[in-house]
Image (spheres, rainbow, N blue to C red):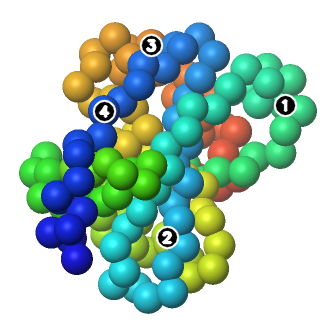
Amino acid sequence: MEGEILALLWYSYEPLKCSTEIRVISLLPAPKFDSNLEIRLPHIDHTSMFVSNAHPSFYKSISYCWGELNFSHALMCDGQRTLSITANVYAMLRLFRRPHKIRYLWIDAICLNQQDDVEKQCSSGLMGNIFHEAEKVHV
């Protein structure tokens, strides 16, 4: 099955509006643990979340040990694109996925374009808010 995912086009990050947007993973449900992983990666306006505290937290944030940066696994992103991820991220997503419910997550390895130094630098100033506003932070 993972080979079918690899046959899709590669995911290309759309730039964030650095001062107003973050990405939050929508991890789609699957009835079986070994089903292919599929996510959506929308841009979310964070200004109302971080500034006014008007919205309840809806995502979990995950901080983890990066380990080796070997992008050995893939998942389907936005229904038609392949996104390469590390074995650690792949394992975490499998553990967090639910059979009948979308799970919302913020994981820097996916939510930040790791190839874009400007985006990473701009987003680093938001990290405190991202973790603070999360429903729960997993380490």
Q: Report, in whole angstroms, how far the alpha carbon at label 3 lies from the one at label 1.
A: 21 Å
Frontmost of labels 4 and 3 is 4
- Give the image quarter of residue 7: bottom left
Q: Amino acid at mark 4?
A: Ser
Question: How many numbered dots are placed on residues in this image?
Answer: 4
Q: Residue at x 59, y 11 (%)?
A: 19
Circle 2 residues within 10 Å: few <14, some 14–19, many ≥20: some
Circle 1 residues within 10 Å: few <14, some 14–19, many ≥20: few
Quick check: 124 above or below 6?
A: above
The residue carrying mark 1 is 53
Circle 4 residues within 10 Å: few <14, some 14–19, many ≥20: few
The residue carrying mark 2 is 96
Horizontal and vertical percent position of residue 124: 45, 21
Q: Report, in whole angstroms, how far the alpha carbon at label 2 lies from the one at label 3.
A: 28 Å
Answer whether residue 120 is visible to the viewer in this image.
Answer: yes
Q: Who comes first in sequence, dot 4 or dot 3?
A: 4
- Give the image quarter of residue 6: bottom left
The residue carrying mark 3 is 122
Is disc 3 placed on a helix, strand or loop?
helix
Is disc 4 placed on a helix, strand or loop?
loop
The residue carrying mark 4 is 12
